[in-house]
Amino acid sequence: MRYTYGMSLWTPEFLEMNAFGLDISDRSFKYAMIERVHGRAELTAFGKGEFPEGIMMAGEVKNEGVAAEYLARMFRGAKLSTNRVILALPEEKGFLRRIEFPEKMDSDKIRSALELHIEEHVPLTAEETIFDYERIGPREVIATVFPRGIVERYMALVRRAGLEVVALETEAHALLRAAVPYEEKRPIMVIDLGETRTSFLIADEGVVASTATKPIGGAIMIDAIQRAAGSSRNEAIRLFYEKGFLPAPPRLRSVSRGEPDHENDVFSALMPLVGALRDEIAKHIAFWQTQRLPPVLIYLTGGIAHMEGLPEYLAYELRVPVSRADPAENLFALDEYIPSINRHDTLLWAVALGLAARNVIEKI
């Protein structure tokens, strides 16, 4: 039996109906649909599309009309049984706050108390926000807060594409569901390595407790390889995935003949960027340790998680076990059913899969 955890910023009563997960980023969007078939969770559809550069920037909708057309074009040809969607909100635009009340608070009074005091915790008024919370103790909650304008623009975009938004959820909560086994209650870190940014979350007792986002992604890494190797963009992408973050083994070669040394080019180009990523992870862990026990394990998701040598390097530098997540293992009963998506791609679709699982897995 599988269960799921998470928090929705907005969920109407009709979420009992089927819905698919939609993850929108600056340069692409991914969707996934998980349905109950013969009493078990099965992946019935998934896919992706790309946006032209500048349509979405830093988690903001810059051209709603063009973005909506790209979404509509994709979903007109998608094999989906519904137009209802569970939508991820951009992590870099939200706030996650641990809030402690002076005394024990009844559940039916928490929301009104947060509305009165939300501006003490985020630089927005209550009217400017949409928020939800998870209770973690008699006097403590973790509140997730988004600017109302960001939420409304995302919902307008998706509706303009002909889709019906039935729930909103943070990327972090979807990632936690996809990347971390439900039974795991120790402090765990998940790092989602995307094309234009990297998101960090720390979960404790199965609850998202800390998040951060930094503009370090695969695009700038590939740019660096392209410059260092003097290669085409496609060649730089190939080198990125084939050579990865592994130092070249010692070998004899004739420098005088001008033979390219792409292995060392790739490693040297990536070293400053991967080092910056390591430093950001270390800072996030250090800040967390001022409040709680450090993470005992780090899971990697996103396309850049497939970089050869990256988990080993981070584990060595951070002194914490690091491994690639396995969303298929966490979301499906693999002894009974094998999803049509391969395990390599589940890391790219982790957010979409986590969203799609939200209204299915917990009911099985």
Image (cartoon, grey):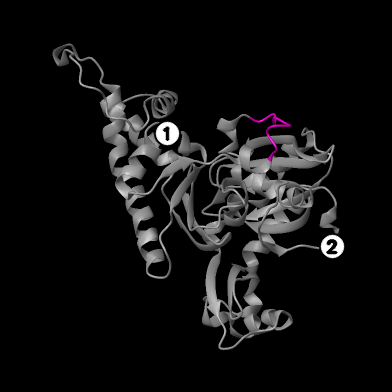
Secondary structure at numbered mark 2:
helix
The residue singled out by tag 2 in the image is: 13
Where on the picture, by quarter, is residue 126?
A: bottom right
Q: Residue at x 40, y 45 (%)?
A: 321
Q: Residues within 10 Å of mark 2 (few under 14, many from 20)?
A: few
**What residue sits 79% from the left and 41% below the top?**
35
Splitting the image into 4 quarters, where does residue 129 fall? bottom right
Describe residue 16's horizontal placement relative to residue 99 as left or right: right
Q: Nearer the viewer, residue 99 or 32?
A: 99
Amino acid carrying label 2: it is: Glu
Residue 27 in magenta?
no
Chain part drawn in magenta: 332-341
Residue toward you, 131 or 306: 306
For residue 177, side relative to residue 241 (left or right): right
Residue at 64% x, 41% y is: 30
Element marked by disc 1? loop
**Residue 18 x, y percent position in the rendering:** 82, 47
Q: Is residue 277 above or below residue 49?
A: below
Measured along the vertical axis of the image, is residue 279 above or below residue 108? above
Disc nearer the start of the sequence (2/1): 2
Residue lying at 40% horizontally and 34% vertically, measured from the top left: 222
Percent position (x, y) of residue 219?
A: 44, 39
Q: Residue at label 1?
A: 307
Residue 73 position within the rendered picture, expressed as x and y whole percent measured from the top left: 74, 37
Q: Which mark is residue 52?
A: none
Q: Is residue 38 visible?
A: yes
Q: Position of residue 280 (x, y in %)?
A: 36, 54
| Left or right, residue 164 beside residue 131 | right
